[in-house]
Amino acid sequence: MGEKVLMKGAEAIAEAAIRAGCMAFFGYPITPQNETPEYFSRRMPELGRVFLQAESEVAAINMVYGAACTGTRVITTSSSPGISLMQEGFSYIANSNVGCVVVNAMRGGPGLGDIAPAQADYFQATKGGGHGDYHSIVLAPHTIQETVDLMYDAFDLADKYRIMVVMLVDGLMGQMMEPVEFKEWVDVKKFKTPEWATVGQGDRDHRNIITSLEILPEGLEKMNLALQAKYKKIKENEVRLEEYEMDDAEYALTAFGTVARIAKTVVEMARKDGIKLGLIRPITVWPFPEKEVAKRADQVKFFFDVEMNEGQMLEDVKLAVNGKKPVHYYGRLGGVVPTAEEIYGEFKKLVGGK
Amino acid sequence: MKLIYKKPDTITERDTTYCPGCPHGIAHRLIAELLEEMDLVKKTVIVWPVGCSVFGYYFIATDAVEAAHGRACAMATGIKRAHPESFVISYQGDGDLASIGIAEAVHAAARGERISVVYINNGNYGMTGGQMAPTTLIGQVTTTTPYGRKPELNGFPMHVPEMFAALDGPAYIARAALDSPQHIIQAKKFLRKAFTAQKNNLGFSLVELISACPTNWKMTPVEAMERIRKQVLPVFPIGEFKVAKGVE
Amino acid sequence: MEKKVIINEERCKSCGLCVSVCPKHVLRISDRINSKGYHPAELFDNENCISCGFCYLICPDMAIEEVRRPEPVKK
């Protein structure tokens, strides 16, 4: 432990999940994240764990749903079009109160789009995506090391709240190589089948039924209110963000994932020029750090949101700022990754215009 | 007095939600009897489908999950792979399995998943009001084939056991019918073999049960059972299509 | 003599399948009405019932709760 190894992001994701105690993988191949299932397919059998290549993403997520009903730490990994196919399953998982981890290595869309890195699934990930009122916890790491670290938390959160946790990364994160350090292995021998799991009644004095169905509106409303209560608890306790050079900042960039990483370089460029620019980087994009962003509205002159989409997180930033200060936006679409120079150029136009 | 038959304890006291004369209840009772006789009740998880039997977990007292429409075999796969000690049954209708869920069912069969599928074929979508199913007979009038099912327009009825028997994964594939006491006794024998296939870790098993839908067929329950014998069984013959060693 | 067929009239939905398969015609639909509004099936001729259990096998509502056969009379 403590030793740094050079790994491709897509493989580091799998290794981290395995060390975090993931006992089962179900998935379907899709570019740009095929190295993840391939890595699982080698490692899981070595450890006596489950790897299964499903016949489709639709089947894969329902296998995850089934495994989650047994209280098993389970994962699927995919990319945008595959994640779209899984939305029905996500909705069922939400209203069944079972936990799992889903990695979305986002690529350019809509439709078949391309296989370049993008962030255009933000709405889909943070606003539910499938039918009904529900949320998943959505983690948006900006380096491979952070992805690896958050994977442990992802499984813990999935277990703690019996909820789906999305690891929202992009194709770039999967394809690049970085030195990473893994935390200690989670001791899977300590795992116990939870009391609520559907594995056969056994010695229990009651049987377990896991369903998202409640035909009476009043009953379904109760189920919904219970979900909302859970979401409230998560909002109160699980918000995470990084504020970079924000202490004295007069301007704030907002960005997540890969773009946030580029934004750090932009901050450094601005600071070199004597401009007090900082970065607010949500790590949980759901729950979104609304209070923290709102607080900075009293401090900065404006916010500058940068994303690889048409301005999706922008809406959450605007809601948090609530009209107190201008919120500007710059983005690239279709899998184009903006450069630091490009973003800084756009930022300077905004500052100069004042 | 000697007890010949007794309602299994695994059938709950709750009244079923099925129409009068609907054979779902017969299938439920056969499953419950076999789980008791084979000492499987406490190990069993039943994956219930979307369809008339969506509330099945209210009627058979085992652990249960409720799948999305057509995804029961995928969900059953997830449960069985994650927890191989569980005895996993996927209970599905003809719309659920042969239409929207055919991919999940075929691949579970091809992989030889250690699950047992109870597949109810009543030739239409019962819960949604009697639309055409993949199993609707040629000429049969449904709410979406008002002029009768026409091959040139709607194709032909799907024979699931015959299709699945061509795969290497299944250990036991059969078709039985629920129209008469004799056929019901036979159905139970077939289901026992299907459950044995899973119990003995031999592979995938499926039993199609030819059923009736008196309400949507617009017949009395007795007429509906007669229709099975006269019109359905000639198209969907009873039989065993694959029997692996060790199932008997 | 004790009843050979025990019917839970509350579970019965009056589908008539038991009546249709009874080889001895000892079952019929009664005039009574259960709480669901159905006329439950009844065994009206216990003596001629042969305890074959066909009614139990076909009953889709598990309303036929028990079928019993008299022990053979010892000589």
Image: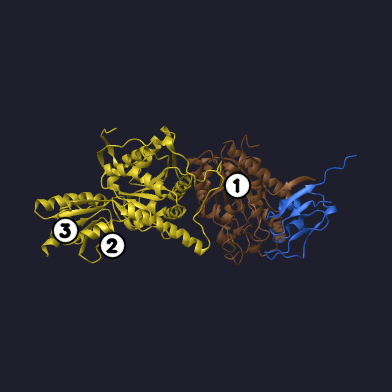
Chain colours: A yellow, B brown, C blue
User: Residue A294, located in which quarter of the rendered image?
Assistant: bottom left
* Quadrant the N terminus of chain A occupies: top left
Going from the N terminus, do you reach mark 3 or mark 2 first? 3
Question: In the rendering, which numbered label is found on residue A9?
Answer: none
**Is residue C9 or residue A309 the one in the foreground?**
C9
* Secondary structure at numbered mark 3: strand
Q: Which residue in the protein does label 2 denote?
A: A315
Question: Is residue C50 among what the camera can see?
Answer: yes
Q: Which residue in the protein does label 3 denote?
A: A251
* Residue A228 point in image, percent of width and height: 40, 58
Please report the residue visible at 75 percent of the width from the left and 51 percent of the height from the top: C54
User: Residues at badges 3 and 1 in contact (C-beta under 8 Å)?
Assistant: no
Q: The residue marked by circle 3 belongs to what chain?
A: A
What's the residue type where badge 1 is placed? Pro
* Residue A178 point in image, percent of width and height: 25, 39
Q: Which residue in the protein does label 1 denote?
A: B161
What's the residue type where badge 3 is placed? Tyr
Foreground disc of the pair 2, 1: 2
Foreground disc of the pair 3, 1: 3
User: Residue A286, located in which quarter of the rendered image?
Assistant: bottom left
What's the residue type where badge 2 is placed? Glu
Please report the residue visible at 16 percent of the width from the left and 62 percent of the height from the top: A301
Question: Is residue A111 among what the camera can see?
Answer: no
User: Residue B13, located in which quarter of the rendered image?
Assistant: bottom right
Task: State the CA–CA distance, disc 3 to disc 2.
Answer: 18 Å
* Quadrant the C terminus of chain A occupies: bottom left
User: Residues at badges 3 and 2 in contact (C-beta under 8 Å)?
Assistant: no
* Residue B115 point in image, percent of width and height: 55, 43
* Secondary structure at numbered mark 2: helix
Q: The residue marked by circle 1 belongs to what chain?
A: B
